[in-house]
């Protein structure tokens, strides 16, 4: 069992991403104290040598740096006791490294509250899904006081193959929005291409071979096209998380007056997929929304309408 009496780090949230991240830390020799709302998620960490705490308060009482990978803003506030008398004593004198995906506005407000009570804050969202998390190959985007960021950067080495300093709090999350805009649109495009190929009577294994051999192939596309060909929608990056991400990106674009039509369309497709009951499937299951549209004749009707009206009349 790892000795947590010296320089222990806390880790809160052992979901699809958090569990492999925490495992990489403890396997690298980081003394770790972990907590998760569902205790069974702690068992692999305990087997690897981490200490398991009964409550978040116990994690804070035994550590000076705490990594949070929680599902959303409400869960983060609840775990920290934000707005209650518990919050100041939890955060005082500690560094909180928040890897969860939240809005930049929330992150700035949380940072201000933590700093007001004598704590330090690092915004540290990551780019990657379950497999890169397992491989320690996530990309970390870091924001906050640069001195504090540099102090925690070595802690993240077992988790991230690269960490990039993005500036003040808020900028790392905005960077993740930009990266995820590309990711979400790209995977929706891949799903549409596979759906198109299948509708033309083509073999998806042959489509996979051609795509993988060409210049558009990437580590992401290779994994996702294989899942499409095998009809394997087991979760690597959950559909519900992709929809949440696309929604936050669309809102940020709207609030800043930025034209972002592709993410708006992708968000609609992701939302349709969630409505089909696929919220806990992998995000490549967005192909289900395309299949549903085809079955309903929606896209065929749109194509016919465009042909009749002409290309300059498409926008209303």
Image (cartoon, rainbow, N blue to C red):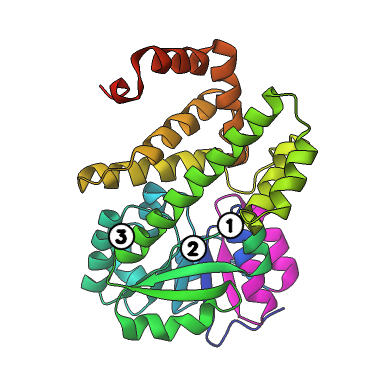
Q: Which residue is mark 3?
A: 107
Depth check, mark 2 against mark 3: the one in front is 2
Task: Report whether 78 appears left or right of 303.
Answer: left
Image marks 2 and 1: residues in contact by CB distance under 8 Å: yes
Say if 135 sits above or below 193 in the image: below
Which of marks 3 and 2 precedes in the sequence?
3
Mark 3 crowd level (few <14, some 14–19, many ≥20, 10 Å Cα): many
- Residue drawn at point x = 70 percent, y = 67 percent: 46
Q: Residue 29: within the magenta? A: yes
Q: Which residue is mark 1?
A: 17
Pick the residue in front: 311 or 80. Answer: 311
What whole-number distance in Å separates the C-alpha atoms at marks 3 and 1?
19 Å
Say if 108 sits above or below 153 in the image: above
Q: Which residue is mark 2?
A: 126
Task: Report whether 52 appears left or right of 71.
Answer: right
Mark 2 crowd level (few <14, some 14–19, many ≥20, 10 Å Cα): many
At which x and y percent is residue 56? 48, 62
Which of marks 1 and 2 precedes in the sequence?
1
At which x and y percent is residue 227? 72, 42
Which of marks 1 and 3 precedes in the sequence?
1
Boundaries of the magenta span = 22-49
């Amino acid at each position: 069992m790892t000795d947590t009496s010296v320089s222990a780090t806390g880790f809160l949230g052992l979901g699809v991403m958090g569990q492999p991240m925490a495992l990489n830390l403890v396997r690298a020799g980081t003394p770790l104290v972990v907590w998760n709302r569902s205790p069974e998620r702690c068992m692999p960490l305990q087997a690897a040598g981490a200490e398991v705490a009964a409550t978040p308060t116990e994690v804070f009482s035994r550590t000076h740096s705490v990594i949070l990978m929680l599902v959303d803003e409400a869960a983060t506030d609840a775990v920290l006791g934000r707005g209650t008398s518990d919050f100041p004593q939890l955060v005082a004198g500690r560094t909180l490294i928040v890897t969860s995906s939240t809005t930049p506005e929330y992150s700035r407000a949380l940072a201000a509250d933590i700093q007001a009570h004598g704590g330090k804050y690092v915004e540290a969202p990551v780019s990657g899904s379950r497999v890169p998390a397992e491989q320690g190959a996530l990309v970390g985007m870091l924001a906050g006081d640069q001195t504090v960021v540099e102090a925690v950067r070595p802690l993240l080495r077992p988790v991230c193959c690269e960490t990039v300093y993005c500036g003040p709090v808020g900028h790392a999350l905005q960077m993740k929005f930009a990266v995820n805009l590309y990711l979400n649109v790209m995977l929706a495009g891949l799903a549409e291409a596979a759906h198109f190929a299948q509708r033309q009577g083509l073999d998806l294994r042959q489509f996979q071979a051609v795509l993988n051999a060409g210049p558009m192939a990437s580590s992401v596309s290779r994994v996702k096209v294989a899942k499409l060909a095998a009809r394997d929608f087991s979760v690597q990056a959950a559909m519900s998380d992709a929809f949440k991400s696309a929604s936050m990106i669309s809102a940020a674009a709207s609030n800043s007056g930025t034209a972002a039509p592709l993410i708006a369309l992708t968000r609609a497709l992701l939302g349709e997929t969630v409505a089909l009951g696929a919220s806990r499937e992998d995000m490549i299951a967005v192909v289900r929304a395309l299949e549903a549209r085809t079955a309903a004749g929606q896209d065929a009707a749109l194509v016919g309408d465009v042909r009749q009206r002409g290309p300059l009349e498409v926008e209303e």
